[in-house]
Image (cartoon, helix red, strand yellow):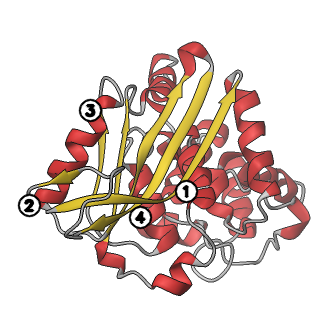
Amino acid sequence: MEDLIPEIKEKLITQLNLKHLKPEDIDENEMLFGTGLGLDSIDALEIIVMMENDYGIKFTNQEEARQVFTSVRTIAECIQSHRL
Amino acid sequence: MFGFKTINTAEINLSGDVPELEVQLNDLYSSMNIQYPKFYKMNLLCKLGFLTCEKLIPNDWKRDVQPAPDKIATIFFNKYASLASDHFHHKYLHEDQLPSPSVFVYTLPNILNGELAIRHGWTGYNAFFAAQNEEEMDYVLHNARISQVFDYVVTGWVETDLSRKKIFARMKLMEVTTNQSPLKDEKQVND
């Protein structure tokens, strides 16, 4: 799963246009929304699209998505669990 | 009687393909020493309008004048509305991909008014008009002032004409004047 973390960081920077950040600037345990990276609702939608397009993961439960999108690590855990 | 007194003007003209324009706008942003990460998320129209507005608003204007946020209007014009972003959104749909929310959200030109409202804390009247030419601007501006109360207006033409590989913005910061003796270079309208 650890190999997914840099990949997700790169994808977030590209997909969300976080051009002021480098992968090493993002702590994989940092909150993505609210006080951490400060992503907004449009970013959340972009992550949902990224998860579906790139990893084939669809979210039908809002609460599940909220938990998965907590941090880079929780996203990686979700992707890893779908691969098993 | 009221008229408009120009406080400041600003202009940006760029040309090139979309990737070149993105680089030019990002370079310009970097050169202006602005710290506003959301800039990178904006579409071409908003980046262009945002940077032109940064050049337009004098550093000491807000401090010295302290204008009421709800008395500052933003009224913009262009010919092609958000066609550049519409095109990108259509491309996603045509390629049978899930459309990008961050592209879709910019498929309206008046998002620029919202971006500037957030950036500067302005809460006054705002509108973005699709017009055939710049001659229509005065007419709309004066009629907007008749129906809406504002003391200052940030206005101008903000265009992304990708068919000619040109983007340009010409903005003015103007004060609404109610002086009794009309200045020669100001238009006066019966209130």
- Judged by depth in the image, the label closer to the viewer, 4 or 2, is 2
Pointer 3 residue: B136
B15 vs A65: above or below: above
* Sequence-first tag of 1 and 2: 1
Please state which amino acid type lies under the numbered disc 2. Asp
Q: CA distance from mark 1 to mark 3?
A: 21 Å
Q: Residues within 10 Å of mark 4 (few under 14, many from 20)?
A: few
Crowdedness near tag 2: few (<14), some (14–19) or many (≥20) residues, C-alpha within 10 Å? few
Residue for badge 4? A62
Name the image quarter holding residue B123: bottom left
Residues marked 3 and 2 touching at CB (< 8 Å) = no
Helix, strand or loop status at disc 4? helix
User: Is label 3 in a helix, a strand or a loop?
Assistant: helix
**Chain bearing mark 4:** A
Q: Which residue is nearer to you in this view: A46 or B77?
A: B77
Q: Are marks 3 and 2 on the same chain?
A: yes
- Whether tag 4 and tag 1 are in contact, CB under 8 A, the answer is no
Q: Which residue is mark 1?
A: B53
Q: Residue at x 43, y 26 (%)?
A: B83
x 81%, y 69%: residue: A26
